[in-house]
Image: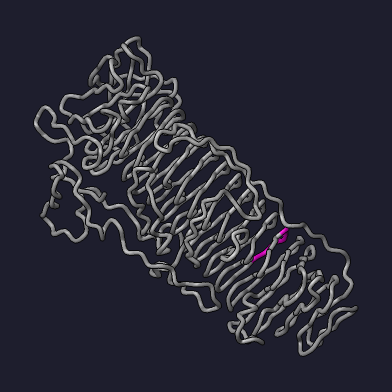
Amino acid sequence: MNKKLVAMLSALSLCVTVTACSKSEDNTKSQSSTNKTSINIESLDNESVSDPDTYIKLGAETTVEGQGAEVSNNKVTITKAGTYSVSGKIEDGQILVDAGAEDKVYIILNGADIKCSNSAPIYVKNAKKAIISLADGTENNITDGETYVFEDESSNDPNAAIFSKDDMTIIGTGKLTVNANYNNGIASNDDLKIQSGNIVVNAKNNGIKGKDCINVTDGNITINSKGDGMKADNTTDETKGYIYIEGGKINITSSQDGIQAETELLIADGDITIKTGGGSENSTKSNQAPGKMPEGMPKGERPTIPDGQTQGERPEIPQDIRHPSSNQDTNKNSNTDVSTNTSTDENTSMKALKATTNIVIDGGTFNIDSEDDSIHSNANAIINGGTFEIASGDDGIHSDTKLDINGGIINISKSYEGIESTTININDGNIHVVASDDGINAAGGNDVSTETGMPGNDKFSSSGDALININGGYVYVDASGDGIDANGSINMVGGTVLVNGPTNNGNGSLDYDETFDISGGTLVAAGSAGMAQMPSDSSSQKILNLSLTSQESNTVVNIKSSDGKNILTYSPSKNYSSVIVSTPDIKDNTKYTVSVGGTAKGEAKDGLYYDGNYSGGTEVGSETISSTITNITQEGASTNSMGGHGGQGGRPGGKGHKMQPNTSGQTNNQINSQITEQ
């Protein structure tokens, strides 16, 4: 993998042009970020093929009928522009195109079976452009050997079973099977376009590679590769090295990255299935179980509280645990054998959709099972639409700098961290996240796994500039770590956000370092009480902070106003003792009563009941709203007053407030009995 970290933050500055409409405001106070960038790029030229000028019939004695080609020692050399039909079978031969610099050469594979033991079976050495057409109803097979003999020992060309030094396009409705035993399957040193065709590639290294770009407009493509599935890797020209997918059906099983672009990855549509590195089940990354001691700490010992840190605050995690050492990738692009032991090679990247600069997705259907991040950009990512089924061994969706979600149906059923970037703008969409650590995490700095290539090394450094803007959409989070975590601020002006978890007292359903201002939308965050944090009291929308005794999962919590209106009926999917609620229906000078247990009937989505009936619960408390934050505490429950005050939230040890003792003199953060990794 090429791990060149390019800090290119310009908005799609290649031969790709992208239209954008944005509103710039102060990063820490912005409550609206309505970037919606759509792909506005022209496809590479479409091709069509005419009737053949010349017929090449492969066999024990290969024959040529027509002009522009000659045969010598089972090698057919095409020397000028034209349309060439290739049929028959040859056990050890080659189609070599060595035409003029302005010649376009059309090759129709019409039931061709070509094997070559020591070079590329199809090698376009020189031409303006090569067009390979798959004749309707035919099956064509291209197979190379395990070693190549090069005419020029200083060059590694050719390095694929079908290889072109110049532009190449594949069209047609027939079938093409490529068995690449030496290195890559299909490769071009310039532009590569797949216009149509039924294509199967089995490759020892990369499946399909276009150095300058890959453009897929249609086709049915299946790739099994021990390197990357699809790859564009021009590292010297910022206007190249991109991948643009407009449609088609793509199924990739790769030991390394699924689709990797050195610059931009642009997807307008398509049906895309990717499995990398053996899938998410192969990942070594997982959150520490509740109550587990940090690695290296003797059993029975309490962690040392750092100087200046108060009892009840989270202990500092040793630096070598929080930030693993990084190893730069040394697996440069070459013709050498690619290791298949991806689970132990720290230089191996196994991401599904990956770009060094930007990712833009306008639509499509995605089924991803990745050992590493499922969607990963070293700069910015924009999702405008599409349907996503994601199982990740690391991050579900990650971008180093900014992530905009403007639409789409996103289901991250498995991840270490679900959604991660420095700035996250959720403007619309239907999002479900399951994470073994943080559900949605805004932090700062480069993803360390970008540098090492290894999943599990993606600790962002803490940054007070990190930001989450929730402007609309529907968000459901099931997290074992923090539900929504910002190393900076959170702003919510609309949408619906439901958070379930964590159940351990070392994390919280909400976690932020600066402020969490809420002015609209519906927020329900249910989880453990030990590190629970509520939005800031600078918020314009009212907030109820419920402190409860431990409740079993699926136990209904209900909030009802004094006039009998149901404000909230919710059934959290995990055990909980803290519920934080903010909706436009919570009003000043109105009394609200909280009940738990009982029965809820009616229409429900993710545990949230709409227009349902609630009955039979136990009343735990009631209060009249007279301030931004109102606390309601069940008898026997620990109180919690983290965050909220003065607009400065945050966990203990940061800019926020320390835990306050409850009426029994206990601290809310039961750090003596439960310690979890930060």
Q: Position of residue 46 (x, y in %)?
A: 77, 57
User: Would residue 643 be seen by someone viewing this image from the given angle?
Assistant: yes
Q: Position of residue 439 (x, y in %)?
A: 38, 44
Q: Quadrant of residue 222?
A: bottom right
Q: Residue furthest top?
A: 563
**In the image, which residues are magenta?**
195-200
Q: Image point 44% across, 20% down: which residue?
A: 611
Relative horizontal placement of residue 337, taking residue 572 as reference (left or right): right
Reply above or below: 186 against 61: above
The quarter of the picture where residue 138 lies is bottom right
In depth, the one of 536 and 123 nearer the eye is 536
Residue 267 location (% of width, % of height): 61, 50
Rendering coords of residue 122 (x, y %): 71, 76
Furthest toward the bottom, the residue is: 73
541 left or right of 122 in image: left
Label tally? 0
What residue do we see at 45% from left, 46% from top? 412
Query: Which residue does the image show at 86% across and 81% down from the upper left?
Result: 64
Tell me, yes or no, if residue 376 can be seen here: no
Say which residue appears at 61% left-offset and 75% top-offset: 180
Classify residue 343 as left or right of residue 526. Answer: right
